[in-house]
Amino acid sequence: MTSAMNLKNCGSVLVTGASRGLGLQIVHSLASGGFSPGKIIATARNPVNTQKLPELADNHPNIHIITLDVLNQQSIEKCVEEVGQLVQGEGLNCLINNAGINVVADFHTVTAEKMMENFHTNAVAPLMITKALLPLLKLAASKGGAGGEGGMGIKRAAVKPFHA
Ligand SMILES: NC(=O)c1ccc[n+]([C@@H]2O[C@H](COP(=O)([O-])OP(=O)(O)OC[C@H]3O[C@@H](n4cnc5c(N)ncnc54)[C@H](OP(=O)(O)O)[C@@H]3O)[C@@H](O)[C@H]2O)c1
């Protein structure tokens, strides 16, 4: 594990698309790992429709579930407000832009709408979410991590993209 991914001294991590798949697995790994972050913020567009995420949160009090539809700017802004209330003056240490979709189409069935939805979800949304959370990421980075070391690493702030 590189120093940038060492979760020791990492106060908070936000994972988008945590309802299932890799996002849920990341939340599970973070919660059960040796150095679990103080706050794991698991976002899902329909938390009430997910079963495994609330079950995981019941067993790990550092998991906080927040609603986020990455295609909806109002939802992004509401999420940022709730994250701000959760992390307070500590800011957000790590953002994992995991939510994404796959175009299920070939050359004959692909449409402009499908491509635009794909581009919006996988490229535009992570940019808008990162932009909206930047003040909280900067706040965490300015703290320099526990002990005020000030070096590069997740104990300050980091953004992880999941798309090629
Ligand atoms: N699996 C792989 O082999 C692989 C390889 C390379 C990259 N990736 C990338 O890794 C990420 C996760 O892949 P996966 O296999 O776990 O996919 P998945 O099982 O299809 O899960 C996708 C996740 O993204 C969420 N999502 C989709 N659109 C959303 C929206 N508008 N707002 C909020 N959440 C939304 C889904 O939420 P809902 O439950 O609400 O639909 C779900 O939680 C994707 O970005 C994918 O492109 C995956």
Image (spheres, rainbow, N blue to C red):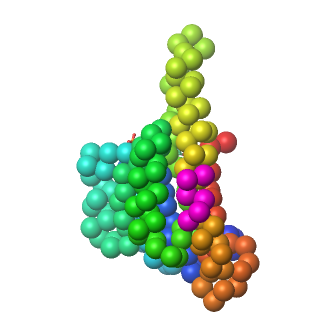
Query: In front: 21, or 11?
Result: 11
Residue 62 at what x, y percent from top left? Answer: 38, 73
> If the image is split into quadrants, where does the N terminus sit?
bottom right
Looking at the image, residue 164 sits to the left or right of residue 8; the answer is: right
Q: Which residues are magenta?
A: 131-136
Q: Quadrant of residue 82?
A: bottom left
Is residue 121 at all visible to an observer of this figure? yes
Residue 63, placed above or below residue 146: above
Of all residues, the one furthest to the right in this rendering is 151
Say which residue appears at 37% left-offset and 67% top-offset: 63
Looking at the image, residue 74 sits to the left or right of residue 149; the answer is: left
Residue 106, placed above or below residue 1: above
Query: In front: 158, or 33?
Result: 158
Of all residues, the one furthest to the bottom in this rendering is 147
Looking at the magenta stretch, what is its main secondary structure?
A: helix
Q: Is residue 135 magenta?
A: yes
Say which residue appears at 57% left-offset and 24% top-offset: 115
Say which residue appears at 59% left-offset and 63% top-offset: 135
Of all residues, the one furthest to the top in this rendering is 108
> If the image is split into quadrants, where does the C terminus sit?
top right
Is residue 25 at all visible to an observer of this figure? no
Q: Is residue 121 magenta?
A: no
Say which residue appears at 34% left-offset and 71% top-offset: 60
Q: How many marks?
A: 0
Residue 10 at what x, y percent from top left? Answer: 55, 75
Residue 95 at what x, y percent from top left? Answer: 56, 59
Residue 50 at what x, y percent from top left? Answer: 29, 49
